[in-house]
Amino acid sequence: MLTIFRRNKRLVDLFNNFIDIHCHIMPGIDDGAKNVEASYYLIKKAQSLGITGFIGTPHVMADLYPNTPQTIGASFDELKEHLLQQKVELSWLGVAAEYQIDSEFEVLLNNKNLLFLHENYILVELPFLQVPMNVERIVQQLIDNGYQPILAHPERYRYFHQQKHVLDVLKNMGCKLQVNALSLSQYYGKSIHKMALDLVEENYIDFIATDMHHQQHLANITEIMLNKKIEKNIEELVHDTKSIFC
Ligand SMILES: [Fe+2]
């Protein structure tokens, strides 16, 4: 009897005009692309993998990267100008931010001085060492303001690995969750890989993005083979991300 084994799919095979809603391609303002040439090469490489739209999301962190709509806007203008000169055509190029939930974020929120991915969608992240006391209050405040928070890479916060119920609370409040493509490999370590697979399989996750900072991230994303157990779920995440943001 002839048995035909179907090969596992590569993650990038699903992209096909994908839009990346979390990436550090804005030049010179965070730990992502150092300058406009680095941004250009990241975009060209991502394009070759089927990512044709981008919403750059530089960090906004009070202590490390105190970016403002002005610093982000200036970086965005520089990138747009360079891409125009290089005749790079994209399906979409937008800019927003990845806001760390800290005390300064409350000030920005109160002043309504925020950048959105699209409509009312706003990308937030948490510190890696300790869950902030105010996370539920801030998420509630975002929702009360009519915003749609998306928590970046929940699988990367190790304090959630033993406390998935906190993610249940955030989800029940209306917060969406975005998994990093690289978490579908062991790039960030075994426990983060396992948490990502569990969250995807248990339908916690709403969106997928690269969170790319440099070329090595894209090289690693290219290598990711999808575990058959979650292939369908990932197809849906790619589809859902495209359908909201493309
Ligand atoms: Fe990020």
Image (cartoon, rainbow, N blue to C red):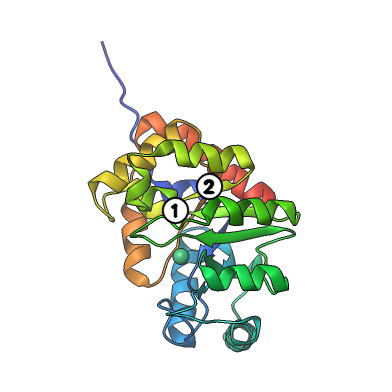
Can residue 92 be seen in this snapshot? yes
Q: Is mark 1 within 8 Å of ligand 1?
A: yes
Residue drawn at x 38%, y 29% as measured from the top left: 229
Horizontal placement of 2 versus 85: left or right? left
Does 37 sit above or below residue 130?
below
Asked where in the image residue 199 lies, by quadrant, the reply is top left
Q: Position of residue 115 (x, y in %)?
A: 67, 70
Residue at 60% x, 46% y is 175
Quadrant in the picture for the C terminus: bottom right
* Residue type at tag 2: Leu
Where residue 7 sits: x, y (%)?
A: 33, 34
Q: Residues within 10 Å of mark 1 (few under 14, many from 20)?
A: many
Q: How many angstroms separate mark 2 from mark 1 (CA)?
A: 7 Å
107 over 122 or under it: above or below:
below
Q: Mark 2 points at which residue?
A: 177
Q: Is mark 2 within 8 Å of ligand 1?
A: no
Image vertical order of residue 80 relative to residue 168, above or below = below
Q: Which mark is residue 153?
A: 1
Q: Is mark 2 on a helix, strand or loop?
A: strand
